Image (cartoon, rainbow, N blue to C red):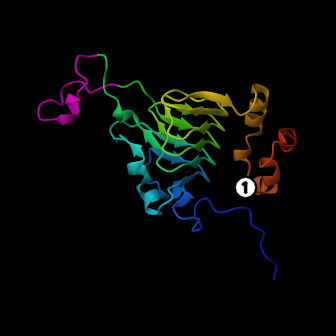
Amino acid sequence: MEVKKQFGPNPNEPLNKYLGTDFLKIYITNPNIEIGDYTYYSSLKSQQDLVNFQNENILYHFPFVGDKLIIGKFCQIGYKTKFIMKGANHGLNRISTYPFSIMGSGWEQQESFISNKGDIIVGHDVWFGYNSTIMPGVKIGNGAVIGTNALVTKDVPDYAIVGGNPAKIIRFRYNKKTIKKLNQIAWWDWDIKKITENLELLASNKIDKLMEKI
């Protein structure tokens, strides 16, 4: 009997392999949260942490605000990573930061608190370390690494490693010329068969060899 060749797991089905680690998109029901294929969350505890992710790890994400969390493909999200959304912001350009308008009972006519923070947008192949926190409006580039306990308040460039509170760039994983090549390769957009056939290169530093595949 011929064995059908496999080209990786199905990103729309549970892994059922590692406790508390699974593809995150399966567990998301909020239309303002977009998670790319093969991006996983690793809770180290149970599948229930994945079910709870959109309510316990994505905070202040109020429907009336309308902001989005967009995470690309093949991202690796460590335990207790949190995304603080636009609804956490209070106006700083007035005497009181108190959000009177949302309390109602005659206060609703007061202008709502205003934030100029936008969506949180994460690129592809980003690694989030344990207990990292991403603040509203932050953009994180492809291939970036977010260190353990980092508090990310500013945009993170492609292939930068950041850490600390507030997070700062520690170094870049590659030089500018190589980063340009990697973004040109954009392996995360290849079909899964091509990715599977080139796993050995993706697990190496043979970037010029990978360039030959585009």
Which span of residues is magenta-colored? 94-114
Q: Is mark 1 on a helix, strand or loop?
A: helix
Say if 213 sits above or below 116 in the image.
Answer: below
- The quarter in which the C terminus is drawn is top right
Q: Tell me: 88 left or right of 94.
A: right
Identify whether 43 is placed above or below 210. below
Magenta stretch encompasses residue 110: yes
Corner quadrant of residue 22: bottom right
Q: Is residue 162 above or below residue 14?
A: above
Q: Position of residue 152 (x, y in %)?
A: 50, 32
- How far across and down, in percent of the image, does residue 198 sit? 81, 52
Image quarter hosting the N terminus: bottom right
Q: Magenta includes 199?
A: no
Q: Position of residue 69 (x, y in %)?
A: 48, 40
The kind of secondary structure the magenta stretch mainly shows is loop
From the top left corner, tell me how far across and down residue 138 is, in percent: 50, 31
Which three-letter amino acid code belongs to the residue tagged 1? Ile
Seen from this angle, which residue lies furthest bottom?
A: 1
Read off the residue under disc 1.
192
55 left or right, relative to 96: right
